[in-house]
Image (cartoon, helix red, strand yellow):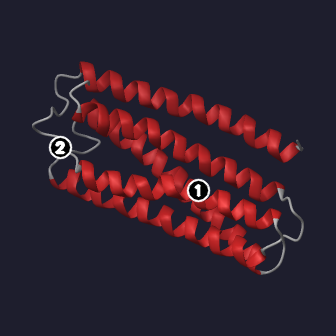
Amino acid sequence: MGKAELGILAFLATEAIFFGLLILSYVYFRVTDNSAPNADILKPNFIRTLIFSLCLFASSGTIVLAEQALKKGNRRGLVLWLVVTVVLGLAFLSGQGWEYAELIGENITPARNTFGTAFFTMTGFHGFHVFGGLVMLSILAGLAAAGDFKGPHSAAVTCVSWYWHFVDIVWVFIFSMVYVLPALGII
């Protein structure tokens, strides 16, 4: 394992702590804030969010296909799967933007209460991380199209892939806490 891989692992460890604290804050405010939207007020579109979430989850598979193409020396496959990963990530961000527009239209905003602040902070930071990943994936796709990756391994592709998987894993926790558990009446 090289310096780049060790560096990204250290970065992801700090990000895991950061997102863990955001998720705990969200759950705390969801449970304790009397002014938090209850099930009658906040009804996010579970099915739509599930569909956009599946796009993000599928992108973990497409980044694996990109890595496999690199290992086989298949530059066109690498570019293709990186671009598909970007498209799936963009679909996810579009869904998040759609949801934000609906919630703000229903007067559920970051300024409304601590619950709103926690919700928008947590999902917003995740969206920011998705956007950052999309920038990195797009750069990799451009470099791959230009022929910059010739060997079976690239630290850049590995590190961006790990970052992307991390972003997906974080969304599993956020999706569970914000959508699944409330839909089941657990929190």
Which of the two residues, 160 or 97, is positioned nearer the viewer here?
160
Task: Give the quadrant of the N terminus.
Answer: top right
Q: Amino acid at mark 1?
A: Gly
> Is the residue marked by circle 2 packed among few (<14), some (14-19), or many (20+) residues within 10 Å?
few
Up-down relation of residue 91 to residue 180 (above or below)? below
Q: Which residue matches tag 1?
A: 61
- Identify the residue at horizontal 55%, vertical 46% (top origin): 167
Relative depth, front residue between 73 and 176? 73
Q: Earlier in the sequence, mark 2 or mark 1?
A: 2
Residue that carries the numbered disc 2 in the rendered image: 43
In the rendered image, residue 52, in percent from the top left (x then y), is placed at: 38, 57
Residue at the spot 42% in from the left edge and 60% down from the top edge: 93
Which residue, as the protein is rendered here, is positioned at the far top?
32
Under circle 1, the secondary element is helix
For the residue marked with disc 2, what is the amino acid? Lys
Q: Quadrant of the C terminus?
A: top left
**In what element is the residue under mark 2?**
loop
